[in-house]
Amino acid sequence: MTTFISRLSDDQVAAFEGKPGPLSGLHFAIKDNIDLAGSPTTAGDPRNSSPAPTSAFAVQRLIDAGAVPVGKTNLDQYATGLVGTRSPYGACHSVFSDEHISGGSSSGSAVAVASGEVDFALGTDTAGSGRVPAAFNGLIGIKPTRGLVSTTGVIPACRSLDCTTVLARSVPLARRVFDQIAVFDPADAYARRTAQRAFGDRPRIGIPTNQLDLDPLHREAWEQAIAETDGAVGVDISPLLEAAALLYSGPWLAERWLAFGQALTDDPTVDTTVRTIVTKGRDLSAADAFAGFHRLAELARDAEPIWEQVDALLLPVTATHPTLAEVAADPIGVNTRLGQFTNMTNLLDLCAVAFPGPARSDGLPFGVQLLAPAGCDNALLDLVEHRVEQQVEQREGTLVAVAGAHLTGQPLNADLVRRGGTLVTTTRTATDYRMYVVDGPLPRPGLTRTDGKPVGEGIEVEVWRLPAAALAGFMGTIAPPLAIGPVELVDGSQVLGFVCTADGVDPDREITSYGGWRAWLNPSRSGGS
């Protein structure tokens, strides 16, 4: 499986390391239709081999925030597809099954995150291309309000609809990334200054009264997701479903032809399915375009009552999780079915967040999404974060606080991910903890507790949930003088965490004043001494 189309060399990656900022030390991947200075932006077409002179606006924002790019990821060619198989670089599959598709078009970005190769990734989402691979790989996928995140430096698929999207393993991390890139870009003609709107104290969540065409395993998981939604309001989503069908039958197909149709020659590197789909846009007339615009306006008006009844709408991301063989047998039909709950989002000016729902009975992930009108991005993230927290609390597992090399973006974080760990929150210890540097193969933090007298604001920790079956194996990797023991958090709750025995403490190597391991690694951002 080809996750990356190109990777930065060790020296290139090292040149980005160590920069202070809110995302310092986090590694990220970039869908290869988004520019990174010095790297070709292929859009899945090997003929596009010239290095980009500058980075995309969103990429540069992340680099300036301390994040470290590591490479450009595979995608459905020219971001046309929801399957992750339409690439001359090879098909991607879900990290949960080598027989099932990864979803696309942001296929490589999703796989890179889900496999633990990077902490987060950028993708794009025009028809669902960020949410579908998130759903098929158990991730969070943020599809922002159109124009809220710049698309400067993104090769257009459907320029008026394209969105730059974030994929991450947790809502808190996805949100940290999103906050850095949700900045108005005056160089982007489609950028908008969108005021954020809040939901009430008790957000109203809608569920469709329509009979959804889901495969049996998806339906079982969907019914469980509905059962977990207290006080849901039933709404008719017929206008949304009809709008979804417009995306590949209306003028927006001509917009794809305008964007890259000239590249769809009979060259063997051009994906034949992409050529077949997009070439139809060449023959659409201006009259066809206005007919599509008029029908969309009618459907948007028909959909208004939905948002009078509810604040957010819960939907499955897809109706099924196809195999690679099923996509090969019917590449257009399977793709069309995958987009029926995602295609309408940008057409109707909605924002959306995809997140894991109840797992299917065969062990594959089942993704759900919450949708809301434009400008509800932050409110939607609040709602998703609360819902995910509730789901996590209901799962079997143990909370473990990590403070050093296992933090997100640090060298041993991948071990937590491989063991099924999920990030719950970032917080601090109680105020009477001290931290010391402990030598070893890797420098490690030694966390100790004083006699109850505050010595600071507490030490930064991440709280992860580990499956019960994985805890013993994880504890076996901890070498003295570190051990697993009780750690009190700033809110008074107690979890397991890394603690240091007294014989491992060197008073000359105390770093408590920095407030945490990451701040010590980048002292210029902490004010510590």
Image (cartoon, rainbow, N blue to C red):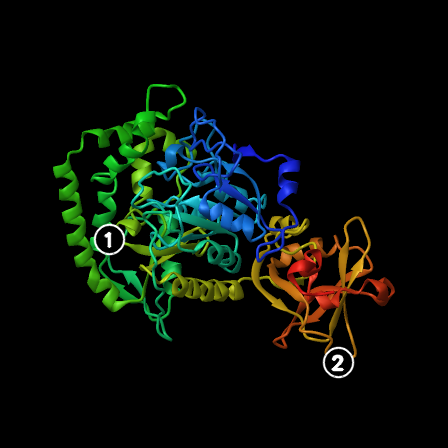
Q: CA distance from mark 1 to mark 2?
A: 58 Å
Mark earlier in primary sequence (1, 2): 1
Amino acid bearing label 2 = Lys
Q: Are marks 1 and 2 in contact (CB under 8 Å)?
A: no
Does 349 sit left or right of 88 as displayed? left
Q: Which residue is mark 2?
A: 453
Please name the residue shown 42% across and 28% down the image. Answer: 45
The quarter of the displayed image where residue 462 is located: bottom right
Q: Which residue is mark 1?
A: 240
Query: Does residue 496 appear anywhere in the picture?
Result: yes
Amino acid bearing label 1 = Leu
Query: Does residue 95 appear anywhere in the picture?
Result: no
Please name the residue shown 33% across and 52% down the image. Answer: 146
The quarter of the displayed image where residue 10 is located: top right
Q: Specify the farthest residue to the front.
A: 186
Instruction: Please tell me how crowded label 1 is: few (under 14), some (14-19), or many (20+) other residues with Cα within 10 Å.
Output: many
